[in-house]
Image (cartoon, rainbow, N blue to C red):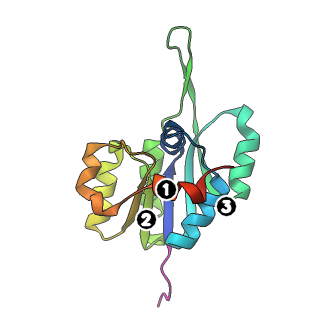
């Protein structure tokens, strides 16, 4: 019989990074990993991120900090003279949350994206959702139904901000 809870976190890195930056600060990913372990007893953290070869040192840093990086190929989308890199990780996050389903007791989803509504709804129904950590004050109104699970990362800014 299992003696301890095993919690996993699943992070939409783009939503997290852009959300925190829009609030005027940068996240210290190493501190965030420690925070997840200490506050929420998170054993494994899956970070879903678009793969850009030039960012190899970032990926090494994230892995050394304790993240399991799941890479998504990226596309360059031309928006007139300002090309944007796209690496939407929503499907990968949902898929891995379900692949790992029997291995964790509770899940933390880090994103404010309404595309995860059905996943969050299912995890709540199965009593498998611990928290939804949203990266800024503006998040999908679809998630408001689960406001008792939502924690805004801004509450932890002093602990998590990169100095």
Q: Quadrant of residue 56?
A: top right
Q: Which residue is mark 1?
A: 10
Mark-to-mark CA distance, 2 and 1: 7 Å
Task: Determine contact: label 2, label 1, CB under 8 Å.
Answer: yes
Q: Residue at x 66, y 49 (%)?
A: 162
Mark-to-mark CA distance, 2 and 3: 17 Å
Q: Residue at x 46, y 48 (%)?
A: 135
What is the crowding at mark 1: few (fewer than 14 residues within 10 Å), some, or many (at least 20)?
many
Q: Which residue is mark 3?
A: 66
Q: In the orientation shown, which residue stands out farthest toward the top? A: 80
Where does the magenta region start and end? Answer: 1-6
Name the main secondary structure of what is drawn in magenta: loop
In the structure shown, which secondary structural element does the residue marked by tag 1 occupy? Answer: strand
- Please say if 91 is above or below 105: above
Find residue 52 and report its horizontal and vertical position in percent. 66, 33
Task: Determine contact: label 1, label 3, CB under 8 Å.
Answer: no
Find residue 87 and report its horizontal and vertical position in percent. 53, 33
Question: Horizontal placement of 8 versus 51: left or right?
Answer: left
Q: Which residue is mark 2?
A: 107
Q: In the orientation shown, which residue stands out farthest toward the front? A: 158
Q: Residue at x 49, y 56 (%)?
A: 10
Task: Determine contact: label 2, label 3, CB under 8 Å.
Answer: no
Find residue 144 and report its horizontal and vertical position in percent. 26, 51
């Amino acid at each position: 019989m299992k003696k301890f809870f095993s919690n996993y976190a699943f992070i939409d890195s783009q939503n997290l990074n852009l959300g925190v930056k829009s609030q005027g600060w940068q996240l210290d990913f190493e501190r965030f990993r420690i925070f997840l372990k200490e506050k929420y007893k998170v054993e494994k953290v899956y970070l879903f991120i678009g793969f850009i070869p030039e960012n190899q040192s970032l990926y090494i840093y994230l892995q050394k900090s304790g993240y399991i990086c799941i890479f998504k190929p990226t596309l360059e989308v031309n928006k007139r003279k300002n090309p944007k890199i796209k690496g939407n990780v929503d499907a990968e996050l949902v898929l891995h949350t379900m692949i790992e389903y029997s291995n964790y007791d509770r899940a933390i989803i880090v994103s404010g994206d309404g595309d995860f509504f059905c996943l969050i709804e299912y995890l709540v129904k199965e009593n498998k959702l611990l928290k939804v950590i949203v990266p800024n004050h503006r998040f999908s109104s679809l998630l408001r139904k689960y406001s008792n699970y939502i924690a805004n990362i801004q509450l932890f800014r002093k602990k998590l901000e990169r100095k």
